[in-house]
Image: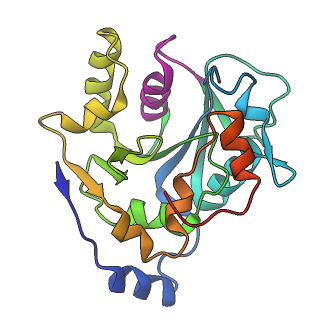
Amino acid sequence: MRKLTPSFFYYRLREWFGMSEGVLENVTGVLIAGGKSRRMGRDKRFLQVGGRSVFDQTLSLLMKTFAETIVVLAEPIESLDVRGCRVVYDAIPGAGSLGGLYTGLISATQARIFAVACDMPFLDVGVIRFMVSCDETADVVVAELGGRFQPMHAVYSKRCVPFLRAMAECKDLKIQKLFLTEGLRVTVLGGSEFSALGAGGRSFQNINTPQDLAAAESPISDKP
């Protein structure tokens, strides 16, 4: 594992000259939406922030950013509008977010994916593009904010697949342990990298409880 301080000048120059605009062809966007929402007490896929479902907001952003977008579910949900995107179902039932990540990786046609949960109402396309582009040789690009990894807003390569499979078979379902795996190249980004992107830290804010939902509906400062 290594911590990387990317060149923001280079990234900003790419933006200014239009090199980072347009749909990303070589990375698949994966929306992992199979959670049980135990702490929330109701299905997070239908939560609304700002009058629109967080699931719909997230899917729309991924579809505008990636040429291929996949939705991973635990089981079919007829009332969920996936906007024509390909839907796949957990290849390893009962493995939680780790199983969803595994399923997304094996289903993607590209070698890398950007994986995100369906409970992040303030996703920032600039943050996503930055994470995808900052180290294209890494098997994992993940943020560590406030001493905590953010595995459901991260980039993964298909080289992670056998490790995730082994973890699932052992019922070791904490994705964070993947980042300690020997043989994988893991790049960790800190808060200082995202602060240069304006409201970048807010991109990682998620909703796990009714209190989180209330906070998301209120004006907040840019804190991860």
Q: Can residue 111 be seen in this snapshot?
A: no
Residue at point 59% right, 45% down? 206
The answer to if 97 sits in the magenta stretch is yes
Q: Which residues are magenta?
A: 89-106
Q: Residue furthest left?
A: 182
How far across and how far down the image is residue 132, in percent? 41, 60
The answer to if 24 sits in the magenta stretch is no
- Please name whichever residue, 2 or 208, is drawn nearer the observer in this view of the structure: 208
Q: How is the image coloured?
A: rainbow
> In the figure, residue 45 lies in which quadrant?
top right
Q: Is residue 110 above or below residue 6?
A: above
Residue at point 34% right, 86% down? 9
- Count the numbered circles shown: 0
How far across and how far down the image is residue 127, in percent? 49, 65
How far across and how far down the image is residue 113, in percent? 44, 46
How far across and how far down the image is residue 37, in percent? 65, 24
Residue at point 69% right, 50% down? 215
Q: Is residue 75 left or right of residue 170?
A: right
Q: Is residue 9 above or below residue 85?
A: below
Q: Can residue 195 be seen in this snapshot?
A: yes
Residue at point 74% right, 26% down? 43
Magenta stretch: helix, strand or loop mostly:
helix
Q: Is residue 199 above or below residue 46?
A: below
